Image: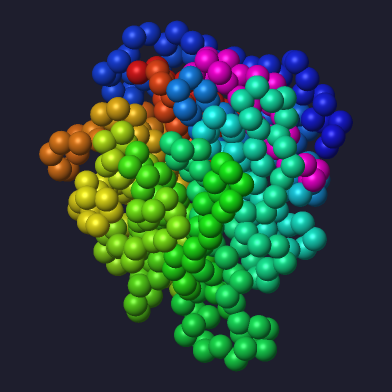
Amino acid sequence: MRRRAAAIGAGALVAIAGALGSARGAGPSALASGAEPLRLGVPGAANSGVSLAALGSSVVVTWAARAGSATDVYAAWSRDGGASFETPVRVNDAPGDARVSGEQAPRVALAGSVRVVWESSQGGNAVVRTATRPSGAAAFGASASVHPEGLTGARGWASLAADENGAAHVAWLDGRGDAPAGEAAAASAQGARRMGHGGRQDLFQASLWPDGTRSETRIATDVCFCCKTAVAAGPDGSVYVAWRHIYKPNLRDIAVARSSDGGRTFAAPVRVSEDGWAIDACPDDGPSLAVDAKGVLHVAWPTRVSEAGKGVFYSRSTDGGRSFAPRARVDETQGGAGHPQLAAAGERVFVVWDEATGGARRALLRSVEASGAWPPRMDAAAALSTGPASYPAVAASAAATLAAWTETDPAGSFVRVKRLER
């Protein structure tokens, strides 16, 4: 993989067509039209698991590239709002150590420097790693675990956010509280059925401060296994974490917990919506969070709607996560949508997701009013991809909304990035 990374070279310097017209105030159907999306990827590797972050005029795309049994994480930085990108660089300093799946993509955040987190299988243990690249630096620094070393159990499904003070906030599922093998074997059949497996996962959050100190908090115990977590930081210093919780007797609904002290402690979780989804397995499809400039908390998530599958829903909280508006449906399928992500930008919230169509999946985007009457006004959904696409991501820079997704063709999988000017 070292040779492949070197082969990217200057030839991988990429650009997104900049002029899509003055679409300010237009719906996403107008925003999504225009130039062909940018294609990114490491030659000879399966590229997937894309994430985006934006701050001012900076945009960073990160994804994973798998070749044989080795998986590496790459990041490409734009300093002009996503109009062009620098040569991608490898993030992980231990070649091939990343462990990536659909709901376990590398995550990226911007706060002066670029920070990435990813799941790793170093030494046979599942760990959550992080590395940073300061603005102006040519490469990422040494990686480190976000949690103590030497823990037992599996962990992963991490999420990442940066606050205005430069602190990074990471949430993940952690199996350190699982029973020893002998006790696990004696666990009740009901407990194993509730989790869809024999193990236990708790929800943790760590805050990594610019001065090198950190704090770690266990937010919830015995949560739904293998659904992605979400974390977001508000302008007032609040930190929010969302996950799929297990409510009695066996309902897999989304919960949100808020910290008012920068991630050091968290209040009791609040249930976003009583969806009534009972399943004796893991849905493998979690929530997404964003906080806008006014401090309004936005959440999108998938849940079961019919025998055909899941739909994507949206809600918001105007009181710091203490209560949430009744859910509003985002997709228009009979039940084939999932994997939502969202980003707040001014008076709009942009939601992306993928859904089944014609035997394949495609990526879509929809714009939602960030405030005002409920239910919110939504612009028409717009298809982002023309080929098979999944696991989209979205971020907002100062002037544009960036959407990205994993796309496949007969030659393999790669990443698409599209700039949608506002």
Quarter of the picture containing the N terminus is top right
Q: Is residue 288 above or below residue 17?
A: below
Span highlighted in magenta in the image: 74-96
Residue 333 % position (x, y): 33, 45
Task: Give the residue at x 22% y 50%.
Answer: 319
- Quarter of the picture holding the C terminus: top left
Query: Which residue appears farthest toward the right when viewing the image?
Result: 3
| Residue 261 percent location from the top left of the image | 39, 53
Quarter-of-image position of residue 349: top left
Left/right of residue 312 with respect to residue 417 in the rendered view: left
Q: Residue at x 40, y 18 (%)?
A: 399
68 vs 169, nearest the viewer: 169
Q: Is residue 412 visible?
A: no
Drawn side of residue 38 relative to residue 379, left or right:
right
Horizontally, residue 154 falls left or right of residue 56, namely right
* Residue 207 on the magenta segment: no
